[in-house]
Amino acid sequence: MNSAVKVREISTKPDKLAFVRMMWDIYKDDPNWIPPLEMDRMKLINEEKNPYYKHAKTKWYLAERDGKIVGRIMATVNDNYIKEQNENAGFFGFFECIDDISVAKALFEPAEKFLRDNGMKVAYGPASPSSNDEYGLLINGYDRPPVLLMTYNPRYYESLIERSGYKKDHDLFAYLLSQETAASDKLVRVTKAMAERNKITVRAFDKKHFDAEVEIIKHIYNTAWENHGFVPFNADEMEFLAEDLKQIYDPDLVLFAEVDGRPVGFALSLPDINQAFHAGPRIPRGWLNLPVGLWNMLTKKKAIDTVRVFVLGVLKEYRGRGVDAMLYTETMQRAKQKGYQYGEASWVQESNIPMNRAAQMMNGVKYKTYRVYRKDL
């Protein structure tokens, strides 16, 4: 008979490190899991360094049984979400758990109490820590590792979460695009004709004016997005993200669509460095975590054959003119010139008809599905 589960709130750096490191026990036998860099994970959950926490109240919990960590969860109240969406809703995230419903329920209990105590009527998740970070639970597409900044989890999490009272709110899709089928000659001709008719030009990111280019991205992102649960980036959050992405981005794969010199859309694509991590020795937890991760990055770059279309957006008044199709085709053509064979468009909300249609027009295969859950509190 199993001993009782004890859940405790944590806040210290050693406990936060244990919060990160417990993942290795959950995924030790899963060949498709990409171990994170502890440094990056600790930065993400650092309430002093990550500007998200300036406008969010957050609690962190570890579940233990017989002195061993068997689960973890975060609960957060995002004041900017409440203001933007006019909904008293909180979120759970960073959910990891052994295959035991008693542990899962023990984790959700204090997390949901925290949300209720702060006046929340609904819980959504997983969001780690927000919809602008890692979002949704993988429910389909376990046969391939996740691409950069996308989530991954055991199959049984779906059951644990649903048995804890959560139901589907909406799904997010990931499309896999192949150079062999994505940008056909006909599609290139059609998009080029539409671009000429609508006076659309495409240019790459100018790294000499990095800060100004980031400001353009922030403006379009915050103006164009209409996804369910969307929360705009503030200046600090955009700077925090830009500093991280600056280490891995390729300016030739960050594209702006312009009409008469005015930026009206952009596509930000990133090399899938997860492939380099996956190709080399598995990154361990502990003091060798960073050295092994860096070694894989330096020696396994040739394993990277995929780019992730991380964000693609078009100002509302310019939709329906082929701007999205132009950005997709230009991205794939430029990626091909650099030797990339595949692209992943992710994530695309199921209700976003134009973006789903654009990915399908590029013969994208919907190969992964992520679910955002909801529970009335």
Image: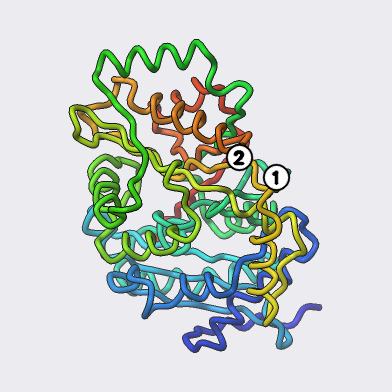
Residue 202 position, x and y percent, is: 33, 30
Q: State the image coordinates of residue 164 (x, y, percent, origin top left).
A: 57, 60
Above or below — where is 207 with respect to 62?
above
Q: Which mark is residue 144?
A: 1
- Is residue 350 placed above or below 119 in the rendered structure? above
- Above/below status of 157 relative to 332: below
315 to the left or right of 193: left
Residue 268 placement (x, y as % from top left) = 41, 44
Identify the image quadrant of the C terminus.
bottom left
Q: Is residue 171 visible?
A: no
Numbered badge on residue 368? 2
Q: Which residue is the extreme one toward the front?
A: 208
Q: Amino acid at mark 1?
A: Arg
Depth check, mark 1 against mark 2: the one in front is: 1
Give me the residue at 56% from left, 86% from top: 15
Q: Could you tell me if residue 369 is visible in this image?
A: yes
Tell me the colour scheme of the image: rainbow
